[in-house]
Amino acid sequence: MATYEKGILGPFTGTVGTVVGANFRGKNIMRSRPKKSNRLPSEQQIVQRDRFTTVNHFLAPLRSLINRYYGHRQGAVSRFNQATSYHMKEAVEFIDDAFEIIYNKVLFAKGDLPGMQDPVVEVQEKSSIDVGWKNNSGQGLAKEDDSLVVVVYIDKLQQFEIFEGVSTRESESIRIDLPTYLKDLKVHCWATFVSDPRKLSATSTYLGEVVIT
């Protein structure tokens, strides 16, 4: 692989003959077109691919949150790649010939800000849930105005509902209205606190699984 600023072809993306061009992290790169292999993948490679596909499909809708709130960039390793690696190792398991996400190990945020203390989630009428917690402002870097982020995943629909800035740490509770078509469906809930001006985040907390009424 090589990088270039100006060349006989100029910047380009895609395949031209035996050369592939792309822009990677702001740099124009060229590399040889990969050769096709006639070798069949091993069983271990197939399993690893299926594991990666399961994790990547689940995390993709959370990419924006993860890129802002999951730890810190480590050299060339993005926050999303760090999260993918974690979930492949810790948050997926093989059940009945397929990989499934372990919901209570899912993390969309990871950081040094104190997280939710004594969190609870309760189902209310008209497709609503109440999320509660104890105000632990003053604990470490926790501030009263830290912003709440809530993530809801509808298992059957493989769909996320994301709520950012819906409350603050000092409020201790919030009612969240979900779409009415989710009635009678099972959902998984997570939440965290973030502090955008200070670019801090807490490690997200799994609140549990509830059925919407």
Image (cartoon, rainbow, N blue to C red):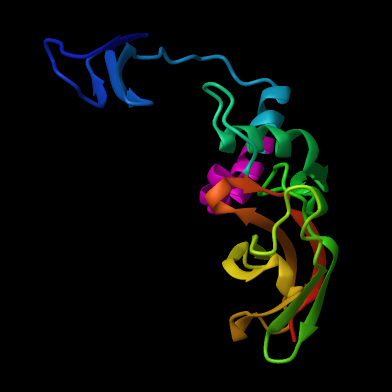
Where residue 88 appears, as percent x and y from the top left, is 72, 35
> What residue occupies the far right of the structure in this picture?
118
Q: What residue is drawn where x is 73% and y is 91%?
A: 125
Residue 67: within the magenta?
yes
For residue 186, which quarter of the picture?
A: bottom right
For residue 174, which quarter of the picture?
A: bottom right
Residue 184 vs residue 105, the one in the foreground = 105
Residue 160 vs residue 142, the one in the foreground = 142
Where residue 182 appears, as percent x and y from the top left, is 65, 80
The answer to whether one can see residue 153 in this image is yes
For residue 43, which quarter of the picture?
A: top right
Residue 21: within the magenta?
no
Question: Where, quadrant-wise, is the C terminus in this rendering?
Answer: bottom right
> What residue occupies the far bottom of the structure in this picture?
125
Where residue 114 appears, as percent x and y from the top left, is 77, 51
The answer to whether one can see residue 60 in this image is no
**Picture layout, residue 162 above or below residue 101:** below
Q: What residue is drawn where x is 49% and y is 14%?
A: 37
Please state the total of marks drawn on the protein image: 0
* Magenta extent: 51-69
Question: Where, quadrant-wise, is the N terminus in this rendering?
Answer: top left
Q: What residue is drawn where x is 62% and y is 21%?
A: 41
User: What secondary structure predominates along the stretch shown in magenta?
Assistant: helix
**Picture layout, residue 213 above or below residue 53:** below
Residue 39 vs residue 171, the one in the foreground = 171
> What residue occupies the far left of the structure in this picture?
8
